């Protein structure tokens, strides 16, 4: 009798265990580490992502060889990339796009897609630590075939920064810039001593101009065009616990400023884009914002949605509750949202998709 009771008890315990497993919530999102750790590379950091004119996804990132240190303390950082032709389901092998000799480093990739000329600009910051260890240069490469091939680097330092900044700590913000409805290419440049500035091109990247209106306080930032044609800069602040917002109605000549306490932030690079996207009409004023949604820690990656050009944020969706840092986002050819972010204390750079239907449901 004792054996029968024991047998029944064991079967009951097994049944309860299986039922418990069956009721555990499944992971809502699928995360794909686009740049897995490998021997000979200390880490991959600072992700960027855009959708090419033909619909391909292009992601770029720092390949930091001897250490995970930033540009001014690292003599071997390359820019590497992967592409996807199926909305992020599969990706090409990792390819080095910018690879200088030892002692020279390239860092902080960011991209702008010119949808009029079908050109992709990839910006980066450069240092020659062997010969000019205190000098930052600002450069780009470009692709006219949807990221398959790229030009040699072009130095635009003198076009977008004044001569007196020669030895200043300055950098183009990683992530992405924009193309406005008028066709102007716009991006952000940070000088920690002289403020955040914008730079632009009105001739599809043939020449670039610095907009001499400093935004203070300011750090890594993103620019987005609002439904009335105004420019909004969404800005990182260190040790404040929130984002800073700047809005210009005259293409960067003058700015209004306000703190946005609803956008909680630990002091980290974030992503913001318009929805549906830059090539669509602007009448709805919908913005998508992704960041580490915590006042002091880089964790809790969250999507927030505004239906009024960023005046308020009416809905949000947690993407990942664990450690999360720099994030970039792009709308895919099929209408879904693609996000790449630094995950789990910089050990992964994960790509995740949010279906368009899920975003639309948050707008209801």
Image (cartoon, rainbow, N blue to C red):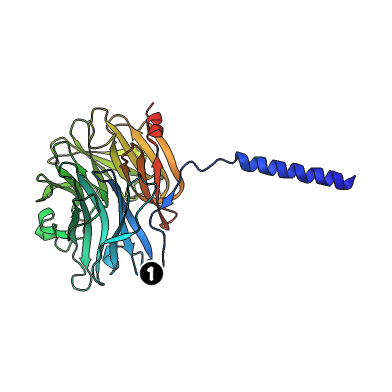
Q: Is residue 28 left or right of residue 64?
A: right
Q: Position of residue 27 (x, y in %)?
A: 51, 43
Q: Residues within 10 Å of mark 1 (few under 14, many from 20)?
A: few
Quick check: can you spot residue 265?
no
- Position of the C terminus, as image quadrant, is top left
Q: Residue at x 27, y 32 (%)?
A: 309
Q: Residue furthest top?
A: 364
Q: Quick one: 96 or 223, which is closer to the camera? A: 96
Secondary structure found at label 1: loop
Depth check: give the residue in front, 236 or 182: 182
Q: Position of residue 104 (x, y in %)?
A: 23, 69
Residue drawn at x 38%, y 51% as measured from the top left: 325
- Who is closer to the viewer here, 90 or 313? 90
Q: Nearer the viewer, residue 195 or 9?
A: 9
Query: Which residue is denoted by mark 1 in the rendering?
Result: 40
Q: Residue at x 77, y 46 (%)?
A: 10
In the displayed structure image, the side of residue 181 where residue 88 appears, left or right:
right
Number of numbered discs visible in the structure rendering: 1
Figure quadrant of residue 168: bottom left
Please provide percent x and percent y for residue 76: 29, 68
Taking the spot 42% from the left edge, 50% from the top edge, the residue there is: 32
Q: Where is the N terminus found, in terms of image quarters?
A: top right
Image quadrant in which you'd find residue 8: top right
Q: Is residue 159 visible?
A: yes
Q: Position of residue 238 (x, y in %)?
A: 32, 51
């Amino acid at each position: 009798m004792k054996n029968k009771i024991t047998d029944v008890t064991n079967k009951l315990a097994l049944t309860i265990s299986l039922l418990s497993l069956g009721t555990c919530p499944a992971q809502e999102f699928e995360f794909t580490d686009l740049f897995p750790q490998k021997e000979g590379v200390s880490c991959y950091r600072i992700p960027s992502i855009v959708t090419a004119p033909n619909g391909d996804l292009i992601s770029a990132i720092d390949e930091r060889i001897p250490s995970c240190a930033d540009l001014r303390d690292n003599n071997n950082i390359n820019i590497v990339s992967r592409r996807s032709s199926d909305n992020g389901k599969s990706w090409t092998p990792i390819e080095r796009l910018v690879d200088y000799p030892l002692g020279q480093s390239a860092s902080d990739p960011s991209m702008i897609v010119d949808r009029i000329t079908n050109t992709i600009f990839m910006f980066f910051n450069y240092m020659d630590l062997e010969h000019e260890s205190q000098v930052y240069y600002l450069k780009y490469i470009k692709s006219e075939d949807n990221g398959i091939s790229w030009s040699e680097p072009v130095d635009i330092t003198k076009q977008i920064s004044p001569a007196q900044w020669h030895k200043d700590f300055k950098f183009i913000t990683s992530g992405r810039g924009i193309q406005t409805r008028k066709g102007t290419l716009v991006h952000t440049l940070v000088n920690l001593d002289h403020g955040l500035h914008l730079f632009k091109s009105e001739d599809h990247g043939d020449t670039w101009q610095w907009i001499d209106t400093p935004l203070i306080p300011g750090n890594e930032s993103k620019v987005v065009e609002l439904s009335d044609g105004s420019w909004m800069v969404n800005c990182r602040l260190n040790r404040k616990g929130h984002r800073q917002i700047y809005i210009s109605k005259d293409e960067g000549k003058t700015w209004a400023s306000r703190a946005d306490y609803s956008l909680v932030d630990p002091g980290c690079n974030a992503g913001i884009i318009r929805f549906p996207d830059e090539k669509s009409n602007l009448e709805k004023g919908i913005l998508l914002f992704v960041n580490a949604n915590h006042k002091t820690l880089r964790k809790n990656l969250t999507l927030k949605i505004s239906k009024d050009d960023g005046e308020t944020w009416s809905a949000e969706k947690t993407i990942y509750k664990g450690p999360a840092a720099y994030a970039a986002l792009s709308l895919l050819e099929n209408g879904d949202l693609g996000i790449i972010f630094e995950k789990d204390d910089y050990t992964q750079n994960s790509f995740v998709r949010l279906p368009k239907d899920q975003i639309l449901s948050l707008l209801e």
